[in-house]
Image (tube, grey):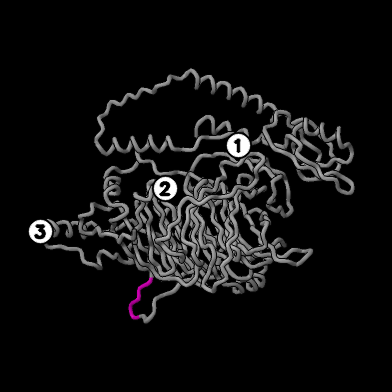
Amino acid sequence: MDVNQVLSEFEQNLFLPRELISCEKEQERYRFTVKYGIVSDALVLICGCIISQALYEELKRDYQNEACCPICQKLPLSSIGPVKPLRILYDQLQYFKREQAELVEAAPTQNTKSESQQQNLISLFHSVASEVGDSNEFEATEVHSLDNVSNTRTMPIQDSSSTSVPIAITESPPSVQLSQLDEKKEFYFAKCFPMYRKRTQYNTHSRFLRTKSRQFINTAISPDCTKFALITEHKWEVYQISRYRKRDGQNKEKDFAKKLGKYAQNKKDRSGSSECVELLFCGKVSGEYGPSFDELSLPEDLDSLIPLSGKQRKSSQSSIDDHSNTWEHLYCKLSNELLVISGSKGHFRVFDLNNGGVPLYTYASSFPIRCIEIDPKSTIIACGITGSDRASGAEQALILFHQIEKDIITQTSVNSEVARYKFSPPITTTLPYRDPINTLQFSPDSAYISCSTALESRFLVISLRRIHEPRLVMKSLRSIDTSLESEGITDTKMFPGNSNLMCVTSVAFNAPPIVINTKIQTINGMQSVAQPTMLLRLDELGSKIHKCEISPRNDSIAFLDRNGTVYIMYAPTLLDNEKRRIVSVEVAANAYRMREAASLRFSADGHKLFILDRKGIIYIEDFAYGLPQDEEVTKCKQIN
């Protein structure tokens, strides 16, 4: 993050109501619509809101006792005093901006590079690619997020032109740094991707003496690709992906046999074995957990098993028995530290992956949970529910945001650190549509959440830069498909480090995967909601795509269709049709519903693609294993 972005981040605290746009006369007061901007004269009101002192004096002068707070609409409009820390911060930021501008003007126009080490061809390519990637980054613009307002009521996302939605540019998530990667792997990847890869298959449950394979209702892979989860209606399992652990004796024997020409790896060896996948822990819906199903036990903190639904918990054993088996698993999501399982009757439960899978928290909503998502940083859990309006009784789409606070406690006796998690009461957000929510997906930097609706097939983007004040920043037009096979929009994924690009997949008539420009980084103070435009339409893949996954390199997308076929679209530039290639990589278990579809995840360096299907089989496609002519490297089928 450069100096301009740091200053821009600090300047967000000064983005407050500054000018009056319009006012509306009500019975006993005026309701105001204001414009936000950088404020140098911050003033705090008796209600706790902070606005510009010039705006406050204008409202008091023109509307006197009938004026209310332009933020929370409370009466009367009265001030406590100036906010001196914010005013000092404004002066300091102006000083640093002037200093930065003078440094830029005094800097030489040409940068001299002094590199004493000689570069080979591969390292030279890496340096050039890094410079090209840096030059293509978006320039930081002076747009900012609104300040938080203490509010405990349900806050609807306003779909009107009066709400200004500023966007701030933050540091992008950790992306692929070419200079830090293994040059040998990079060379293999450049030669193979996307046409050649090594296929590896691991079976978590053996089919020996079974007439039918094990079926799971939902799957998930962690962002770091080291763990994956499988759930049934009443059980859950978490596995760790081993890094090709083989005994040294076996490796030496195989190497010696290869030298003599007497060893050839057969198909069974290439497909892998269950020894490369280790069961970390498992559990049941009753709250029992352990390293295996033969060693299950209840947690020490029994309150973590009792649903928290806004009422006071009961710590009696009878209350635990009442809630232990009253719900069934439906969905699961995995971060690097937490496992979240949602189910029937509005329940979801959180498990600690760093502490043996112990249950941490159980929540019960008054309405059924349609979808659930956890951000990569393990700080927010989002639930999509369909509630009802108290006044009219009509259905309403809602999103619950559960904040997670993590405290690291150092135990001096054993010289180790223990993480303690605290779950705040949920923040309820109302969508401007009554159509039920179908999917939820956080952006890689957790700054946005994209969601889609079930019946009218809309997709929306909500800004979470102020979690207590979420903002609708993008919406699409509706598209209705009444056919029985239609599942609507099935997945929405933002590109890592570039929130202007998003991939949308659907299972509907004449709805192939598309890549859109969200335009959320171009929103100004007067425009509240952006309208996306389509950049790319992939008719070759058909209209029955369940999931997609963006590579951290931003040059390829993996797709999964209803039949279980996994495709990879490689496009160095999205708009260049000649360089775009689509290949068929793998065939996993098919899925009749989106909930049963396989999970996809790219590794952090983009070299491997992990696929986990409902039969408990994980496929690893390694594009940096070796050269195309190597024995274990096979070719993909090109589609276009």
Nearest to viewer (mark 2 / mark 3): 2
**Would residue 637 be counted in the magenta stretch?**
no
Q: Secondary structure at mark 1?
A: loop
Mark 2 vs mark 1, CA separation in Å = 28 Å
Main SS category, magenta section: loop
Whichever of callouts 2 and 1 sits on the residue coming sooner in the sequence is: 1
Image position of 464 with respect to 346: above or below = above
| Mark 2 vs 3, N-terminal side | 3
Check the image and report above or below for 101 versus 392: above
Which residue was labeled with disc 3? 260
Of circles 3 and 1, which is in front?
1
From mark 3 to mark 1, how far is it between C-alphas? Answer: 67 Å
Q: Quadrant of the C terminus?
A: bottom left
Question: Quick check: 535 left or right of 64?
Answer: left
Q: What are the residue bounds of the magenta stretch? A: 205-209
SS class of the residue under badge 3? helix
Residue on which disc 2 sits: 575
Asked if one can make out residue 373 in the rendered structure from this viewpoint, the answer is yes
